[in-house]
Amino acid sequence: MENPVIALLSSRRSVKPDRLLEPGPKPQELETMLRIASRVPDHKKLAPWRFLVLEGDARVRLGDVIADACIAEEPERPSEVRLAMERGRLQRAPLVVAVVSRVTPHRSAPEWEQILSAGAACFSLCLAANAMGYGTSWLTEWIAYSPRVRAALHLADNERIVGFVYVGTPAEPPPERERPALVDIVTRWSA
């Protein structure tokens, strides 16, 4: 009998956000996903990440902020089509979780390790959602780096978005894509 965890890991795929439909996770499912996402390597128990849940009308309101940021930060006035897309960016899936890296200076836990822990939290969130039958897409896009979006999300100076994780029911199974051959990415060190 095949191990179900290995089967999940061997077949998981990202689903484009606009292919993630209702229903999204129920509150108890989301709580389970977030609990699992917080069980990642965390040197010195700093919890160098946090989760911002974006659902319902909050996605619409933040979409307005994103459109305003696009107008203010682009060198030329964006088209109305682009602004409509920006307003709807977070509505492409029923649920979006912003995973925030928050680095705490610590001599035994370098900044890089803390950021990697936040990345692991993103992927664990994806895996937990996938194990529950939901599709996911982990993206940053320009909004993760926008000063205006950062301000609207009330990010502290030591915080940055490591991913917006879109979660929903896949419209169809995602197509497989080519993966690198192990011979091209694996070497063995020898003295």
Image (cartoon, rainbow, N blue to C red):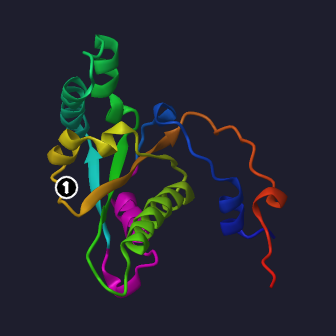
Residue farthest along the top direction in this orientation: 80
Which residue is at a point 61% across and 35% down the rendered structure image?
Answer: 172
Which residue is at a point 40% across and 32% down the rendered structure image?
Answer: 92
Q: Quadrant of residue 36?
A: bottom left
Q: Quadrant of residue 8?
A: bottom right
Q: Which residues are magenta?
A: 25-47
The stretch drawn in magenta includes residue 30: yes
Where the N terminus falls, by quadrant? Answer: bottom right
Which residue is at a point 84% across and 60% down the rendered structure image?
Answer: 183
Identify whether 112 is placed above or below 87: below
Q: Is residue 27 left or right of residue 22?
A: left
Q: Is residue 124 left or right of residue 97?
A: right
The stretch drawn in magenta includes residue 33: yes
Identify whether 35 is placed above or below 162: below
Rate crowding at label 1 as few (under 14), some (14 to 19) or many (20 or more) other CA atoms within 10 Å: some
Q: Which residue matches tag 1?
A: 155
Q: Secondary structure at mark 1?
A: loop
- Camera-side residue of 109 and 7: 109
Query: How many numbered discs?
Result: 1
Query: How far from the left and from the top, in percent, is residue 147?
Result: 21, 43
Where the C terminus falls, by quadrant? Answer: bottom right
- Camera-side residue of 177 and 25: 177
Query: How far from the left and from the top, in percent, is residue 117?
Result: 43, 70
Residue farthest along the right direction in this orientation: 183
Instruction: Identify residue type, mark 1.
Output: Leu
Q: Is residue 43 left or right of residue 83?
A: right
Provide the major secondary structure of the magenta segment. helix
Query: How far from the left and from the top, in percent, is residue 82?
Result: 34, 18
Which residue is at a point 32% across and 52% down the rendered structure image?
Answer: 98
